[in-house]
Image (spheres, rainbow, N blue to C red):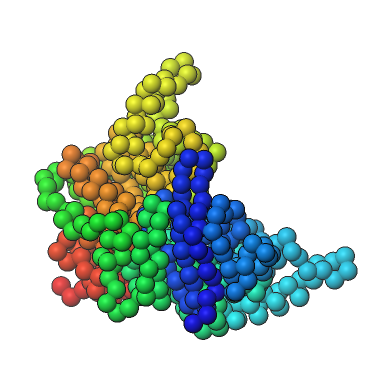
């Protein structure tokens, strides 16, 4: 099989930090290849070199048989990069996004008909039936990913790098992306799939490469005998204990109760409760209403109909300040848009919710801030060289740990976690799960909003399943099986 990409003895350093140490990476033509590793392993650096965003310090790169050193233009010509952070403009339609910065013209006027037709042909080639005139703001997350892929296709890319494309997608949306990937593969296009979801790697990929601490540690074909455990062991360097996380513990009285909660077109007649020290999951498919429901509980989605009771007292959750005053913390679904401030440092992001507590006469007590930051860097094992660096200097997984630290440092009684391990590698996931269970043992209550059933199985005492804005079933821990949850989440019912 011909090679679409050959990277040999790749070396890259940033100052004294050796990020890549003689890495080899080979991508076969017309295949889907997984690039794996923990956060900070060097995956993004390697792909940024391949995508032409970074210069290599040493090593050789060939793309479709052409040496990049002698023809740097081959990267722009042959490679498309679909980044984890989507760069679409919501206020433009699909074809306007696809041609943004490279518009077609007829004389002095835009050739809208020509751009629309070319966009339509590209989408049809990908097996996607959607109008190019659709506004991007109206698209589901999976279709936004597809538009990003289409942008790469517009330049006739033969190689597409996909960086965590399924991180914030539901199962149905992921299948949609996989269908597009399979269609492109059949057309001879080669894809590099970067993901922390090892079950997806086994489902969609033909082969894999694993990096650890900037070194190549494993590579091979994905076969019927390849297991998530095998891949995670390569990534971490030792067998990852994914079992034994849940612990039975004392559960207290009801601390949060929702009664007849409704909001037009978002959720309807929701009744549920959470006890002190309990970990409760809420799951379903895209559009189930769980994010909107708990945004209301935190005070970020007012008005609503119904009652939110905190320790038996009805509270009107009009603002997020009301939520914080009532000892509720919230970790939002989209870290990039809602969880971090990119222009601020790691320590500034972490202590942002408690600035008033560590300030006197408008001045921040630096020693107190340092104490809080060091405490949470240690507690959550955040891999950071200097907390004064920008938050964007951290890997996605470590950024997520900072966001979780922000929620914890407010000394809450209830924490709502929406997609808590988004973009986090398997080792970091287990660390976060163990931290959740440890804090629950200390009496903290958790609501975990997640589409990942293994996540619920690892930590939850019980879980509610939503369908079209309504709670359809409550499962005890022993009944949290994929079959049960998916049956209810897709509109079925459990025989009593």
Position of residue 20 in the picture relative to residue 262 (left or right)? right
Name the residue rendered at 33%, 59% in the picture: 235
Give the vertical position of 98 relative to 310 (above or below): below
User: Residue 139, percent across and down?
Assistant: 55, 66
Single out the residue that lies furthest toward the top. 361
Which residue reaches farthest bottom?
Answer: 186
Residue drawn at point x = 50 percent, y = 58 percent: 10
Q: Is residue 3 left or right of residue 224?
A: right
Left or right relative to 456: residue 21: right
**Front one among 40 and 262:** 40
Residue 26 point in image, percent of width and height: 48, 70
* One can see residue 205 in this view: yes
Using the rendered image of the protein, determine whether residue 341 is visible from the camera's viewpoint: no
**Which image quarter: residue 277?**
top left
Q: Say how many tags the image has.
A: 0
Q: What residue is drawn where x is 14% and y is 51%?
A: 247
Residue at 60% across, 64% down: 136
- Viewer-side residue, 37 vs 436: 37
Residue 135 in picture, x, y percent from top left? 62, 65
Residue 316 in picture, x, y percent from top left: 36, 41
- Quarter of the image with the C terminus in it: bottom left
131 over 368 or under it: above or below: below
Look at the picture and state if 469 lies above or below 359: below
Measured along the vertical axis of the image, is residue 328 above or below residue 78? above
């Amino acid at each position: 099989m011909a090679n679409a990409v050959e990277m040999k003895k790749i070396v890259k350093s940033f100052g004294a930090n050796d990020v890549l140490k003689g890495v080899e990476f080979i991508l076969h033509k017309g295949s889907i290849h997984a690039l794996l590793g923990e956060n900070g392993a060097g995956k993004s650096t390697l792909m940024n070199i391949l995508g032409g965003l970074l210069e290599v310090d040493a090593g050789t790169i060939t793309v479709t048989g052409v040496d990049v050193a002698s023809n740097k233009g081959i990267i722009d010509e042959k490679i498309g990069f679909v980044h984890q952070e989507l760069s679409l403009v919501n206020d433009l339609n699909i074809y306007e996004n696809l041609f943004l910065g490279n518009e077609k013209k007829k004389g002095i006027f835009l050739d809208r008909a020509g751009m629309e037709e070319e966009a339509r042909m590209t989408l049809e080639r990908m097996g996607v039936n959607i109008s190019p005139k659709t506004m991007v703001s109206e698209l589901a997350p999976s279709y936004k990913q597809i538009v990003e892929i289409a942008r790469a296709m517009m330049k006739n890319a033969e190689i597409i790098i996909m960086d965590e494309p399924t991180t914030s997608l539901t199962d149905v949306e992921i299948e949609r992306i996989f269908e597009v990937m399979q269609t492109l593969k059949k057309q001879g296009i080669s894809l590099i799939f970067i993901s922390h979801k090892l079950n997806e790697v086994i489902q969609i990929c033909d082969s894999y490469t694993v990096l650890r601490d900037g070194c190549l540690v494993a590579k091979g074909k994905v076969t019927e005998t390849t297991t998530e455990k095998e891949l995670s062991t390569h990534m971490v360097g030792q067998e990852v204990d994914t079992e034994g996380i849940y612990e039975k513990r004392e559960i207290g009285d009801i601390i949060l109760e929702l009664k007849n909660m409704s909001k037009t077109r978002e959720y309807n007649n929701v009744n549920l409760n959470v006890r002190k020290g309990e970990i409760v999951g809420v799951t379903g498919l895209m559009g189930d209403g769980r994010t909107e429901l708990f945004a209301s509980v935190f005070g970020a989605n007012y008005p609503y109909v119904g009652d939110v009771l905190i320790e038996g007292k009805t509270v009107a959750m009009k603002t997020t300040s009301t939520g914080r005053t009532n000892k509720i913390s919230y970790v939002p679904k989209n870290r990039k848009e809602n969880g971090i401030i990119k222009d601020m440092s790691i320590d500034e992001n972490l202590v942002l919710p408690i600035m008033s507590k560590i300030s006197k006469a408008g001045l921040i007590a630096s020693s107190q801030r340092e104490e809080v930051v060091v405490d949470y860097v240690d507690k959550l094992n955040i891999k950071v060289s200097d907390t004064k660096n920008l938050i964007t200097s951290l890997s996605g997984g470590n950024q997520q740990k900072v966001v979780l630290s922000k929620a914890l440092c407010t000394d809450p009684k209830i924490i709502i976690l929406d997609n808590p391990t988004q973009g986090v590698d398997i080792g970091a996931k287990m660390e976060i799960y163990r931290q959740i269970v440890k804090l629950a043992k200390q009496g903290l209550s958790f609501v975990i909003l997640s589409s990942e059933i293994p996540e619920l199985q690892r930590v939850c005492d019980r879980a509610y399943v939503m369908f079209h804005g309504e709670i359809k079933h409550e499962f005890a821990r022993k009944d949290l099986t994929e079959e049960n949850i998916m049956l209810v989440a897709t509109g079925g019912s459990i025989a009593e």
